[in-house]
Amino acid sequence: MSFTLRPYQQDAVNATVAHFRRHQQPAVIVLPTGAGKSLVIAELARLARGRVLVLAHVKELVAQNHSKYQAYGLEADIFAAGLQRKESQRKVVFGSVQSVARNLDQFDSAFSLVIVDECHRIGDDKE
């Protein structure tokens, strides 16, 4: 099963891909509640050439994002203590911020793309 992105979702994906083709700086995608961010995340993870880490601050979002990615017929790992899974070897890993931060030693190869869902909920280095 696959999904057809809505025009604004495809625009977000296209703009993100175009940004990273020209720049190495981080990008922020802003979509309103209910806009289907998990589909945009799944599409970006699907398109990525290297390893992808998708982080969320709650286990429900980790599970939702993982589920949407799997709906493309693709496999991914989950690294989230709250979901009782700590897998980190596949090309795409969906994880909770807390679990990944506490277990960085279990991630032995670099990620080419890191996506943080609900990034406004993540504190800066000072917190």
Image (tube, rainbow, N blue to C red):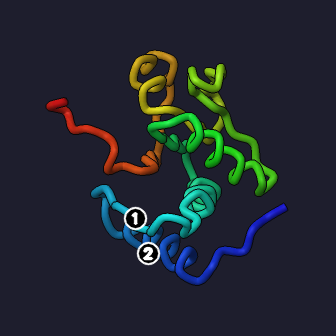
Q: Is residue 103 above or below residue 98?
A: above
Type of amino acid at the residue the image marks with label 2:
Ala
Residue indicated by mark 2: 15
Tell me which residue sits at (34%, 61%) in the image: 27
Q: Is residue 52 above or below residue 107?
A: below
Percent coordinates x, y for residue 58 in the rendering: 50, 36
Q: Quadrant of the C terminus?
A: top left
**In the image: residue 98, left or right of residue 63:** left
Type of amino acid at the residue the image marks with label 1:
Ile
Tell me which residue sits at (71%, 47%) in the image: 67
**In the image: residue 96, left or right of residue 73:** left
Q: Secondary structure at mark 2?
A: helix
**In the image: residue 114, left or right of residue 60:** left
Residue indicated by mark 1: 29
Question: Which residue in the rendered view is the most extreme toward the right?
Answer: 1
Q: Quadrant of the N terminus?
A: bottom right
Q: Secondary structure at mark 1?
A: loop
Question: Which residue in the rendered view is the most extreme toward the left?
Answer: 126
Tell me which residue sits at (62%, 56%) in the image: 42
Question: Which residue in the rendered view is the most extreme toward the front?
Answer: 33
Q: CA distance from mark 2 to mark 1?
A: 9 Å
Q: Pick the residue in front: 59 or 53.
A: 59
**In the image: residue 42, left or right of residue 67:** left
Mark 2 in CB contact with mark 1 (< 8 angstroms): yes
**Circle 2 or circle 1, nearest the eye:** 1
